[in-house]
Amino acid sequence: MWWWRDTIRTAGEAAIDVGFTDNVGGFSDGPLRSLNLGGKVGDDPDRVLRNRSAVAAAAGVADDRLVFMQQSHSTRVATYRTGAAGPIDADGVVTAEQGTALAVLVADCTPILLADPAAGVVGAVHAGRPGMVGRIVDNALDAMATLGGANPVAIVGPSVCGRCYEVPLEMREDAAAVTPASRAVSWAGTPAIDVAAGVVAQLAARDVPVTWVPGCTRESDRLFSYRRDHSAGRFAGVIVQRDQDASFDV
């Protein structure tokens, strides 16, 4: 179930669990097997709910405390509060609540988890090429700051690597004009974009310490990849702030 997971300990009694799922241990079948968490990729809705429930249980929260966004490659960042009405129409979400697990869905894009342990503020961000170019990272850090999260750390999850993300030259140069670190060359020597490298550079520019989890979605069969298989499911980055007596299960 977990590609990678860790716990950020705080000076007080709280802890922040972070992790990225893989595609193993779920209930979906066919090209979406088995731990597909995406609700808009043609999967049986009941199977998606069972998969999400399994992740919620592994994250130590009730099903309704595993919070997903309606992602659309925007640069919108929302603030989550329990009881908020309607879906979260955004590609980033932040909260200061304990016991709420924030989730970001990806299948090549870059998942970013943010945490300020001292302030008790966490966030989850979806950054594809449009989000990186639109600097959604800055929007998320600014949203955290409004909740008191002035000194966050970031965990950047697995995504398609620069050598596997071939694009037209003009598209690459447009991205590089925003963040030069995103300029890449594919395995074939053609123009490419490294979205994760661009995101890491943007975080570094804001003096945010980064843990960059290795893994290329297109190269690993344990991760969903839209570039490798257009019928792919979605895996998730998950972050939850809790008391120290609980943590992620395997």
Image: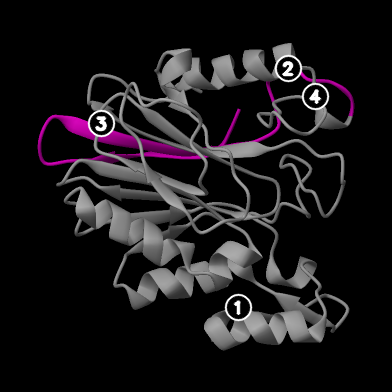
Viewer-side residue, 159 vs 176: 176
The residue under label 1 is which amino acid type? Ser
Name the residue located 41 percent from the left edge and 20 percent from the top edge. 65
Circle 3 SS class: loop
3 vs 1, front mark: 3
Q: Which residue is mark 4?
A: 43
Residue 9: quadrant of the picture: top left
Instruction: Return the disc, 3 or 4, that comes first in the chain's sequence.
Output: 4
* Marks 3 and 4, how far apart at CA: 31 Å
- Contact flag, marks 2 and 4 (Cβ < 8 Å): yes
Residue 124, percent from left and from top: 44, 45
* Marks 1 and 2, how far apart at CA: 36 Å
Name the residue located 61 percent from the left edge and 68 percent from the top edge. 195
**Mark seen at residue 45:** 2
The residue under label 3 is which amino acid type? Glu
Per the rendered image, the range of residues in magenta is: 1-30
